[in-house]
Image: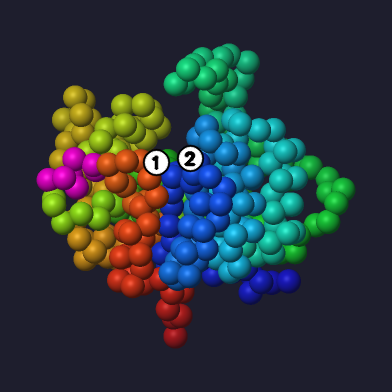
Amino acid sequence: MTDDAYTDLGRVGIWTFAYEGQPAQRVRESAAEIEELGYGALWYGEAFGRDSFGQGWLLLSATRRITVASGIANIAFRDPIATATATRTLGEAFPGRYVLGLGGHRVDDTVHEFDGYPVPARGRAVTSVRAYLDAMDAVPAHGPVPDPAPRRVLAALGPKMLSLAAERTWGAHPYFVPVEHTELARRIMGPEAFLAVEQAVVLDTDLARAREVATAHVAGYVASAPHQQANVRRLGFGDADIVGGPSRRLVDAIVAYGDVSAVRRRVQEHLDAGADHVCLQVLTADPAALPEDAWRELAPALPLGPAPSVP
């Protein structure tokens, strides 16, 4: 089979962490509605809720056409053998509809704590991910081989990881990035690599309230995610934007907030900067809630279809 066997992700999808805390039947119903709304892909995170591949199976089995993509499956959580075989299983059961997003850092023997959980220490990111991909590729297939093979993307931010994404996978899935990063990523990866950008949004016409939700989101990442802080510094943000809480400039660069037109403008900016696909993470005051009203309101206003062909 050729690339035609893959489901087109379209230009806009949904990204969410919220499914981790929802009952399975609620997740099924919600995923089916997202598909019917016309979004091209459904991206989901992995923290300490459902296993990424179990969540992927749940979403794929509840839908018929939409692409389901991990955003991301953390390589620190499982051995490459487990990742390779689980990916093959989803790819064989749901041909052309599963995209494996990989990220995180492979680990050594040191253990520290995160939110009360023991987590092995991180290694060097690019070296770790390259080795992980090598190990996945070396796993023999003792069962059915999916055709087409599931596509893979990397959670890439810095130049070296973006280059690795273009070299070894379908492309990159940058998270927590401004439009300037999209332009940079496209230059580094070249015209052929797939670029799927996460964009956080707050759909609320009360701008003060929307900015409060957006600020809390950005503050959490710059305070607790060193790789995200390093990335925004690489893009020209300094201590004045980060230390003591995020600046308005940084919040506005990372989160699109306001009415539907504000979200639509930001999506178009990413597409104009070189993104193939933008997946929207709708933020609310309650991170565990499903922002279904916002998903419904946004759908008719966004360019959900495939990218226009170039004559």
Residue 11 shown left or right of residue 136 in the figure: left
> What type is the residue that disc 2 sits on?
Gly
Residue 152 shown left or right of residue 137 in the figure: left
User: Is residue 287 in view?
Assistant: yes
Q: Residues within 10 Å of mark 2 (few under 14, many from 20)?
A: some
Q: How is the protein colored in the picture?
A: rainbow
Q: Is-magenta flag for residue 82?
A: no
Relative to 78, residue 148 above or below = below
The part of the image, by quadrant, that contains residue 1 is bottom right
The numbered mark at residue 288 is 1
Secondary structure of the residue carrying numbered label 1: loop
> What type is the residue that disc 1 sits on?
Ala
Looking at the picture, how far across and down is residue 274, in whole percent?
Answer: 38, 62
Span highlighted in magenta in the image: 208-214
Residue 85 shown left or right of residue 172 in the figure: right
Mark 1 and mark 2: Cα distance apart in space? 7 Å
Q: Tell me which residue sits at (57%, 39%) in the image.
A: 50
Q: Tell me which residue sits at (75%, 45%) in the image.
A: 85
